[in-house]
């Protein structure tokens, strides 16, 4: 039965969701991502390659490799918790070594030079969770982005001509997504 002919059936609504970034916290623990900061979240998507086989004047296709596509989110950049600090700390804790500190890593025997690595990057975010909700708050479905890490962070644009909220756009890469229906 179509949702527009029955009050018991309802379509999913794009403004009913919760975004959880379970491990995204500043180094000192003072700031951590909060669900109310989410403004927009893309949902997972995948692409399956097709391998072509030609035989006797016909072309046949066979499914190949599955690739999960990046997911982008937009969060409000609050003063507290400080979104800039949280994401910069996540980058540093992922193994990034600020160029001004690189020289110290070579002269200080207690510090090793490092680079961003998957284990550390995934540990900073945890598995991203997107929950879709019904009007009464019940969960309709849950997406989990497995082994998520940040590949792009844009800290917004300052502009004297408007008074909108400052946003941070973040793109995540992940190995695969899992979906669980809540209905």
Image (spheres, rainbow, N blue to C red):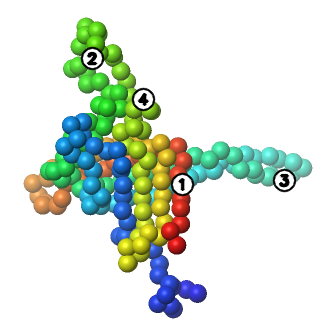
Tell me what residue is drawn at x 18 percent, y 53 percent: 78
Q: In the rendered structure, which disc, 2 or 4, sits on the residue that comes first in sequence?
A: 2
**In terms of secondary structure, where does tag 4 sit?**
loop
Give the number of the mark in front: 3 or 2.
2
Q: In the rendered structure, which disc, 2 or 1, sits on the residue that comes first in sequence?
A: 2
**Figure disc tally:** 4
From where the camera sits, is residue 155 visible? no
**In the visual, does 163 lie left or right of 156?**
left
Quickly name the residue at label 4.
Answer: 117
Residue 99 quadrant: top left
**In terms of secondary structure, where does tag 2 sit?**
helix
Can you give x and y, in whole percent of width and height, for residue 111 in the image? Answer: 29, 15
Can you give x and y, in whole percent of width and height, for residue 25 in the image? Answer: 28, 43
Quickly name the residue at label 1.
Answer: 178
**In the visual, does 88 lie left or right of 181?**
left
Give the number of the mark in front: 3 or 4.
4
- The outermost residue toward the right is 56
Q: Are marks 3 and 4 in contact (CB under 8 Å)?
A: no
* Marking on residue 132: none
Q: In the rendered structure, which disc, 1 or 4, sits on the residue that comes first in sequence?
A: 4
Within 10 angstroms of label 2, few (less than 14), some, or many (20 or more) residues?
some
């Amino acid at each position: 039965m179509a949702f527009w002919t029955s009050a018991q059936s309802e379509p999913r609504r794009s403004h009913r969701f919760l975004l959880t970034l379970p491990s995204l916290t500043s180094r000192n623990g003072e700031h951590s991502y909060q669900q109310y900061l989410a403004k927009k979240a893309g949902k997972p998507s995948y692409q399956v390659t097709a391998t072509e086989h030609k035989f006797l004047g016909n072309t046949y296709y066979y499914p190949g490799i599955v690739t999960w596509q990046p997911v982008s989110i937009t969060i409000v950049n609050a003063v507290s918790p400080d979104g800039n600090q949280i994401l910069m700390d996540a980058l540093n804790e992922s193994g990034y070594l600020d160029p001004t500190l690189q020289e110290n890593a070579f002269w200080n025997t207690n510090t090793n030079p490092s680079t961003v690595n998957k284990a550390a990057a995934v540990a900073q975010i945890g598995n991203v969770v997107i929950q879709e909700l019904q009007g009464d708050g019940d969960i309709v479905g849950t997406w989990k982005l497995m082994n998520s890490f940040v590949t792009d962070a844009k800290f917004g644009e300052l502009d004297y001509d408007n008074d909108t909220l400052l946003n941070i756009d973040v793109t995540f890469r992940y190995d695969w997504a899992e979906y669980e229906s809540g209905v």
